[in-house]
Image (cartoon, helix red, strand yellow):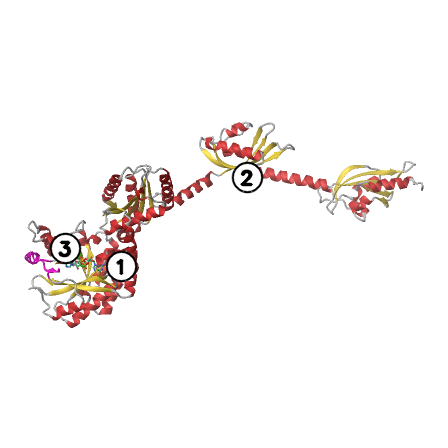
Amino acid sequence: MVERTQADVLQSILDSMGDGVVVVDRVGDLVSVSPAAIQILGADPLTALASLCLPDQRTPCPLADTPLARAIVGVATDAAEFFLPTGRWLSITARPQIDDNGAICGGMAIIRDMSAARSAEMALRQSEERYALAARGANDGLWDWDLLTDRVYLSPRWKAMLGIDEGEISDTPAEWIDRIHPDDVETFKVRLSAHFHKLLSFFEYEYRIRHCSGAYRWVLCRGMAVWDETNHATRIAGSQTDITVRRAVEQQLQHDALHDLLTGLPNRALFIDRLDRTIAIARREKERRFAVFFIDVDRFKTINDSLGHARGDELLIIIAERIQGCLRPGDTVARLGGDEFTILVENLLDDQSVDVIVNRIQRAIAEPIMLGEHQAITTISIGVTTSALEYTGSAEMIRDADTAMYHAKMSGKDRHTIFTPAMHTQAMADLQLESDLREAMAHSELRLHYQPIITLAGGRVNGFEALLRWQHPQRGLLYPGSFLDTAEETGLIVPISWWVLREACQRACEWQDEFASDPALTVNVNLSARLFAEPDVVSQIATALEVSGLPSSSLKIEITEHNFVDLSGETGQILRHIRDLGVHLCIDDFGTGYSSLSYLYSFPVSTLKIDRSFIRRLGLPDGQNEIVQTIIGLAHTLGMDVVAEGIETEQQYEQLRDLHCSLGQGWLFAPGLDNEGVRALLAGSGTMHT
Ligand code: C2E
Ligand code: CA
Ligand code: CA
């Protein structure tokens, strides 16, 4: 066994140490270095030890102050911290080396690598600083609940959120929980406990909490617990955010998604939801009866087009209010869109109560409505279907109520109809009609017939009224009563009317060329009110005249009095443009409207046509001539022509002549004739019934 020297022993101790050891002689030259020192300081430990920085990581340590330099002049250093530009943190202890004579013979430094500890510590400090900064700056309130002592720390922001001053609330959690809304507190506790038992990976809950003003605020609370070895939660900390504004916005959005913005009524989605629920309940409770009403405003489009959309909206709001006023709190009124409303009447007693409700609504709607300076009188058509038909879905029930409404509309508006399964067939037929009508346009199945208008004094043909006919491939010749409403509803009336205009002008011009007369023959064309909302109505008329070559004074446009009432100021302007073309305007069906006569002054009208219903009463035993007499007098006073419509008997003819009515038309003279018929008539004497 080799005997080991003292130096060998020392070296092996040094080699095994984690701390590095560097020994220098009295002039600072390297005597020995341990492997750990090489590892910490690198291959050149002396240079490394000469380049130490102070703990601020920036300022180089003066060479004379480095631990070994101090050691060789006899000064010890105890665990001083330095930073190496390589990024390491060192703790260095240094001692002078004393020889046997008590003289300094060198120095020794023990170097400990502190890097790992320091960086953990720095990271901790940084994160603590960050946390403190965040807590101060955040909008969130913070809380930290020690479950072992049952004390909770609430941050100033947490308290401020509820208007609580520092010191106004203690650190007992009960004071927090007491402020939670009674409806939310149970769930709060349940969720918290679920998290403590690790059933929820974190605690999160939105609840209402009482502000010191007494009002509740919505808050979002989040937290995360810490558990001990036995899986008992010992502490939970988290944040609380005020989400009152977000909640309000959400609630508004939710409300908006289910309600009509204009009237505030439930919308289609909500209506369907309620109806589905009612149907489901009724399937369990057989005796429960309910009904769906489908309401459509009559002639809404005319009002909307003539008075403008803002007035149309006003009208809808008023109608919505009136309908609502007629119902019980449990019933639902919805606006499906446009001028369509639906009602779900729950707990219907019997079928009579349907009539009662309908009458109530119709009476409410019938009250005149002021729209700006215009007084509008509106009516509605109502379709009803009841649970007696054992519906299984809301879609069918609404569809059938709609079909019934359509029937009410077709049978003259301002009334109600209760759905019967037979209507289904009819509804299909109507759909068919619409598609047929489109085809009719494409295949030129439309025709015009012309009814002569004659001078009552001389029996001379003055002109013709163009009347629309449809040569239907299966159903034969159709009169406007059977398809005009469909044309109006689908908007097909617009292209149809332009066609009628051109066709009538064309024919009239041909007749004038072939059968000269003085005054020249005129042609009357019926235009529905909605045409006057078409932007190109004036240019369409001008084009029809231009293309045909018909003098504008030979064209007369008929507008029914009913429609006239709805014509707004803007339409008056259009009518004046038409008059400026030289075209005449007639008020059709005069006497049936209920408006004031003021429009006779404000619109440029040249002819009144007395409605058929007044002529029919002429010559009856109790026939009243006064109305007809008044209209004729009025027309003369205003310098207008007057035409009596629907003259069927000699008696009517004679009376009208005696009343000095200048013009007339009716089956007594001739029905509507096709072009051949007209030419045959004109080719004859040109006079009739003298
Ligand atoms: P209207 O303008 O009052 O037209 C007169 C209607 O009375 C015509 O019915 C005509 O055939 C009918 N008539 C004529 N003489 C007599 C009579 O002596 N006794 C009876 N009871 N009726 C008579 P028609 O052709 O079925 O037209 C019905 C309505 O359709 C018209 O009423 C008019 O408002 C509308 N219409 C007709 N053609 C057109 C058109 O081209 N465009 C538009 N928008 N509407 C039209
Ligand atoms: Ca007419
Ligand atoms: Ca008429």
Q: CA distance from mark 2 to mark 1?
A: 65 Å
Locate the C terminus and report the quarter of the image it occupies: bottom left
Which amino acid, mark 3? Arg
Q: Quadrant of ligand 2?
A: bottom left
Q: Residue at x 60, y 37 (%)?
A: 132
**Which numbered marker is on residue 493?**
1
Tell me the crowding category of disc 2: few under 14, some 14 to 19, or many 20 or more residues within 10 angstroms, Cα based.
some
In the image, taking residue 566 as reference, residue 6 lies left or right, namely: right
Lower sequence index among marks 3 and 1: 1
Q: How many marks do you count on the picture?
A: 3
Residue 252 percent across, percent down from the top left: 41, 42
The magenta stretch is 648-668
Lower sequence index among marks 2 and 3: 2
Locate the N terminus and report the quarter of the image it occupies: top right
**Which numbered marker is on residue 138?**
2
**Which numbered marker is on residue 612?**
3
Q: Give above or below for 433 relative to 506.
A: above
Which amino acid, mark 1? Ile
